[in-house]
Image (tube, helix red, strand yellow):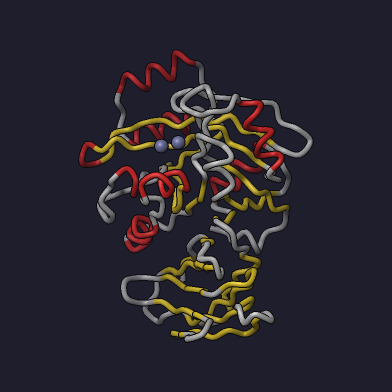
């Protein structure tokens, strides 16, 4: 997986999980597009349940017709899968729905129809962390879903993600609103996609390659491996963490009683918040990922790096 900071291109603020009146959302597709455009997004994926929804792109906002499908997960859980940029007719969708397919079959279908698959909200769904296996053609998962957090406090699937990483499946993870009531449950979580241009193909390529990071507020400006350490540049944050395998990792916490573990701040702003930190890669690490949190507790997540 090539990091978004080491490749050229442009940063696109992307809303990747949203609903309209074509399923259980409140706004018509064109009004939802206008809403996200006003909130200064660059990309919108409309992901209505079982309906591929399109809306006109504008000068500012690229709309990617997408869909949210159901599948059967281990333990007979009803899983939700986001299919970005998929192209299929209603009869084909109906046929897939009739099949009650598992995750792998659903992902095969998505791939065959030109889409990129991500598993939505595993914590909300109730998948047991550690039992989930992602087929190769499911690119990644949602690490944070704002709607699931707002409604039932099950928005953060970091444990599910870390268990996949622990098992050697270095998948990327997006953050998204899953907005049904724009204004009330929107502009809370997004994905910063690094793409050579603002086109459908370029964004789908970046999603397939994990060239992005996810956020509920903070910016991650750079993540760079430097020998046995990782250097992170970010908007002012209270915590910068290097998450790795079980019991290992590193962190810099600043504030009244700061705490450093295998890391240190290289630069802080006037309020004493970290903007540049250096974290040691644990000797036994096989992968690391960077997570930051600002003074309000809002987080951002970089995708894993193999070490
Ligand atoms: Zn869902
Ligand atoms: Zn949804």
105 or 68: which is nearer to us? 68
Q: Residue at x 47, y 24 (%)?
A: 23
Residue 28 spot, x, y in % from top left: 60, 24
Task: Please indicate whether residue 208 sits to the left or right of residue 202 in the image.
Answer: left
Residue 241 spot, x, y in % from top left: 48, 73
95 or 189: which is nearer to us? 189
Residue 70 spot, x, y in % from top left: 36, 31
Is there any visible trace of residue 136 in the rendered image? Answer: no
Q: Residue at x 52, y 22 (%)?
A: 22
Report ligand 1 position as a quadrant: top left
* Above/below status of 170 relative to 118: below
Q: Residue furthest top?
A: 91
* Above/below status of 190 relative to 232: above
Residue 76 spot, x, y in % from top left: 22, 36
Is there any visible trace of residue 155 in the rendered image? Answer: yes
Q: Residue at x 61, y 33 (%)?
A: 64
Task: Please indicate whether residue 167 sits to the left or right of residue 31 in the image.
Answer: left
64 or 156: which is nearer to us? 156
Question: In which quarter of the view is residue 38 placed?
Answer: top right
Question: In which quarter of the view is residue 136 placed?
Answer: top left
Q: Residue at x 72, y 57 (%)?
A: 8
């Amino acid at each position: 997986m090539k990091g978004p900071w080491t490749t050229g291109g442009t940063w696109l603020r992307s809303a990747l999980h949203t609903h309209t009146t074509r399923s259980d959302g409140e706004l018509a597709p064109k009004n939802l597009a206008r809403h996200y455009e006003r909130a200064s997004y660059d990309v919108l994926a409309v992901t209505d349940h079982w309906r591929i929804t399109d809306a006109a792109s504008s000068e500012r906002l690229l709309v990617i017709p997408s869909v949210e499908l159901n599948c059967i997960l281990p333990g007979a859980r009803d899983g939700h899968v986001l299919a970005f940029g998929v192209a299929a007719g209603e009869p084909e969708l109906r046929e897939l729905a009739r099949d009650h397919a598992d995750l792998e079959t659903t992902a095969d279908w998505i791939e065959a129809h030109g889409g990129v698959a991500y598993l939505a909200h595993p914590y909300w769904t109730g998948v047991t962390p550690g039992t989930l296996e992602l087929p190769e053609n499911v690119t990644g998962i949602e690490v944070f879903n704002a709607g699931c957090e707002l409604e039932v406090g099950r928005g953060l699937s970091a444990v599910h993600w870390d268990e996949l990483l622990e098992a050697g499946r270095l998948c990327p993870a997006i953050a998204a609103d899953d907005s049904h009531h724009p204004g009330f449950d929107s502009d809370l979580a997004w994905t910063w996609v690094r793409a050579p241009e603002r086109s459908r193909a370029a964004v789908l390529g970046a999603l397939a390659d994990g060239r992005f990071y996810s956020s509920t507020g903070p910016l991650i400006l750079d993540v760079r491996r430097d020998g046995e350490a990782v250097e992170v540049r970010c908007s002012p944050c209270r915590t910068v963490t290097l998450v790795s395998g079980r019991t290992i990792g590193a962190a810099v916490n600043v504030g009244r009683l700061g705490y450093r573990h295998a890391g240190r701040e290289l630069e802080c702003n006037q309020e004493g918040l970290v903007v540049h930190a250096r974290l040691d890669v644990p000797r036994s690490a096989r992968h690391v990922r960077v997570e930051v949190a600002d003074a309000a507790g809002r987080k951002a997540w970089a995708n894993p790096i193999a070490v």
